[in-house]
C-alpha cells in the first residue's frame, strides 16, 4: 500500500535524478494552450472496457448456497506479518477484522499454477478503482479468468466520501522495502511485499529468492484510498473497518491466498514502520452445505488462441 508522498520524499527523489529540477508535484505548463484547447477538453469520455456482456450479479443464489455453510478452516494473520491459506473452487472465504481497525494486502494465485495470479490492473480496468459485491478478481494474461467473486461486504455502506475516498482499492501496489529504501534510506523488512514473500516461501518450502517474483499487486482490503482532486495523487486515510467487519468471496477456481496485515495499521498516518497501532486479520473458509448457484462450474482460462496474428 502506497501513501501520498510527503514533500521531503519528493526532494529525496529529486536528489537522485538530475531531471527533477523542482519539487512541485505537477509542473506548470510549459507550452501555450492552442485555440481549441477547451474544445478538446470538453470531449466526453468513453468507458474503455464496458462490461455489459457480463451476466448481472445475482446475490440470491449465493445467499442460498451459504445457508448452513460450515466453517472448515481459519487462519489468523499476525500484525506486520502474512500467512497463506488454501481455498477450493466452490467454497466461500472471508477476510475478517477480529480485533481492531486494520487493513490487509491480498494476493491470490491459482493453486495448481502459481504463475497465474491476481491481475489488479485488469480488475481495475473492468470494475473500477475500488471493488465490492458482485465484482470479480481477474487473473493475469494469458489466463484472464475470474479467480474469485466478491459476494458480500459489510463496508458497502461507505461508498465514496467527500474526498473521493473509497474502500477495497485496486489502485495501489503494496508497501515494499525497495521503495522504502529509496525514500527513507533505511531497510524495513515488514512491508507487505516482504511479508507476502516470507509467507509464500514458507508455504512452498522454497527460498524467498525463488518466489519473490510471484508476489504481485494486491487488493487492498479495508483500506480507504483515492486520488487528491488537485494533483491526482494517491492518498490513504483512516479505514472505516471495525471489529466484526468482513469482505467475503466465492472461489471460482482452486486458490492459494496470501494476506498481509499491513504495518500501516488502519493507514491513517504512518507507513512501513513500527509507529502505527496494528491488529490481527482473519481468514475464514466455508464449505457450502446447500447447492451452488445453478449452472456454476469452476472458471476456465481464456479461450483466446494465442495466435497473436502470426501467419
Image (spheres, grey):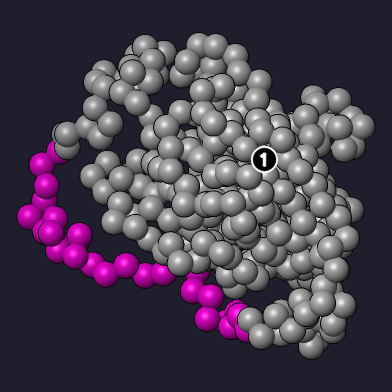
Q: Residue at x 77, y 39 (%)?
A: 83
Bounds of the magenta span? 31-58
179 with respect to 99 (left or right): left
Compared to 261, does 305 lie above or below?
A: below
Quadrant assignment, res 88: bottom right
Mark 1: few/some/many CA within 10 Å (<14, 14-19, 20+): many
Compared to 276, does 148 lie above or below?
A: below
33 with respect to 191 (left or right): left
Q: Which residue is outermost to the left?
A: 35
Compared to 47, does 232 lie above or below?
A: above
* Residue 55 place in picture, x, y as percent: 62, 83
Q: Is residue 98 magenta?
A: no
Q: Is residue 129 visible?
A: yes
- Quadrant housing the C terminus: bottom right
- Secondary structure at badge 1 equals loop
Q: Write down the residue under mark 1.
A: 280
Quadrant assignment, res 159: bottom left
Q: Main secondary structure of the magenta part?
A: loop
Q: Residue at x 38, y 34 (%)?
A: 4
Q: Residue at x 17, y 34 (%)?
A: 28
Q: Residue at x 25, y 35 (%)?
A: 26
Amino acid at each position: 500500500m502506497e501513501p501520498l508522498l510527503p514533500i521531503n520524499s519528493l526532494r529525496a527523489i529529486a536528489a537522485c535524478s538530475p531531471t527533477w529540477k523542482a519539487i512541485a508535484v505537477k509542473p506548470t505548463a510549459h507550452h501555450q494552450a492552442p485555440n481549441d484547447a477547451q474544445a478538446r477538453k470538453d470531449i466526453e469520455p468513453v468507458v474503455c472496457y464496458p462490461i455489459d456482456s457480463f451476466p448481472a450479479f445475482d446475490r440470491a443464489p449465493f445467499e442460498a448456497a451459504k445457508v448452513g455453510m460450515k466453517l472448515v478452516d481459519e487462519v489468523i494473520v499476525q500484525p506486520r506479518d502474512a500467512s497463506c491459506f488454501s481455498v477450493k473452487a466452490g467454497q466461500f472465504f472471508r477476510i475478517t477484522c477480529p480485533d481492531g481497525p486494520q487493513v490487509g494486502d491480498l494476493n491470490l494465485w491459482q493453486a495448481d499454477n502459481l504463475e497465474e495470479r491476481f491481475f489488479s490492473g485488469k480488475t481495475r480496468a473492468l470494475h473500477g478503482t475500488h471493488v465490492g459485491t458482485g465484482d470479480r478478481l481477474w487473473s493475469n494474461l494469458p489466463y484472464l479468468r475470474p479467480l474469485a467473486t466478491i459476494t458480500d461486504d459489510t463496508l458497502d455502506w461507505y461508498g465514496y466520501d467527500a474526498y473521493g475516498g473509497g474502500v477495497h482499492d485496486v489502485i495501489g501496489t503494496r508497501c515494499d522495502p525497495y521503495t522504502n529504501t529509496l525514500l527513507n534510506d533505511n531497510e524495513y523488512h515488514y512491508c507487505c511485499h516482504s511479508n507476502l514473500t516470507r509467507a509464500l516461501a514458507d508455504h512452498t518450502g522454497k527460498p524467498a529468492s525463488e518466489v519473490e517474483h510471484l508476489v504481485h499487486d494486491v487488493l487492498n482490503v479495508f483500506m480507504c484510498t483515492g486520488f487528491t482532486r488537485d494533483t491526482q495523487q494517491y492518498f490513504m486515510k483512516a479505514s472505516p473497518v471495525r471489529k466484526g467487519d468482513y469482505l467475503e468471496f466465492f472461489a471460482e477456481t482452486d486458490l492459494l491466498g496470501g494476506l498481509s496485515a499491513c504495518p500501516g495499521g488502519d493507514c491513517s498516518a504512518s507507513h512501513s514502520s513500527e509507529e502505527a497501532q496494528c491488529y490481527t486479520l482473519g481468514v475464514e473458509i466455508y464449505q457450502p452445505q446447500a447447492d451452488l448457484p445453478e449452472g456454476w462450474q469452476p472458471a476456465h482460462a481464456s479461450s483466446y488462441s494465442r495466435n497473436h496474428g502470426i501467419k
